[in-house]
Image (spheres, rainbow, N blue to C red):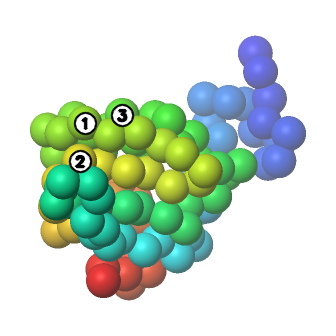
Amino acid sequence: MKICEICGLPKDLCVCEEIAREVQKVKVYTVRRRFGKLMTIVEGIDEHDIDIRELTKTLKSNCACGGTSKKGQIELQGDHKRKVKEVLAGMGFSSDTIEIK
């Protein structure tokens, strides 16, 4: 059985990631890329506390779009600001700390 180095609990019962979600200050905004395409950018998520690849995979499936995670930020194809906020709030992120620009 693996034990978390931070909280000392077994990995099955570890609450470190849930606590980190409540504290994160997340920014969600759109930028216009080549050929006038919109990209939704999600930044402010600490890669060391939260598995950003798993979060990217969840956001991509819930928004039904393509995307990637680069340099500590998540890039989604299209304008999905409202949907991203709903999904993040459903995953345990505090709605007050999610800022939409």
Query: Residue beneath label 1, please?
Result: 66
Provide residue 34's location: percent of width, then percent of height: 27, 54
Lower position in the chain sequence, tag 1 or tag 3? 3
**Res. 57 mark:** 3
Residue type, label 3 = Lys
Query: Residue beneath label 2, please?
Result: 77
Contact, mark 1 vs mark 2 (Cβ under 8 Å): yes
In the rendered image, which quarter contains the N terminus? Answer: top right
Residue type, label 1 = Gly
Front label number (1 vs 3): 1
Provide residue 69's location: percent of width, then percent of height: 48, 43
Provide residue 83's location: percent of width, then percent of height: 17, 60
> How busy is the neighbourhood of tag 2: few (under 14 within 10 Å), some, or many (20 plus)?
some
Front residue of 13/82: it is 82
Height in image: 10 above or below 52? above
Contact, mark 1 vs mark 3 (Cβ under 8 Å): no
Contact, mark 3 vs mark 2 (Cβ under 8 Å): no
Quarter location, residue 97: bottom left
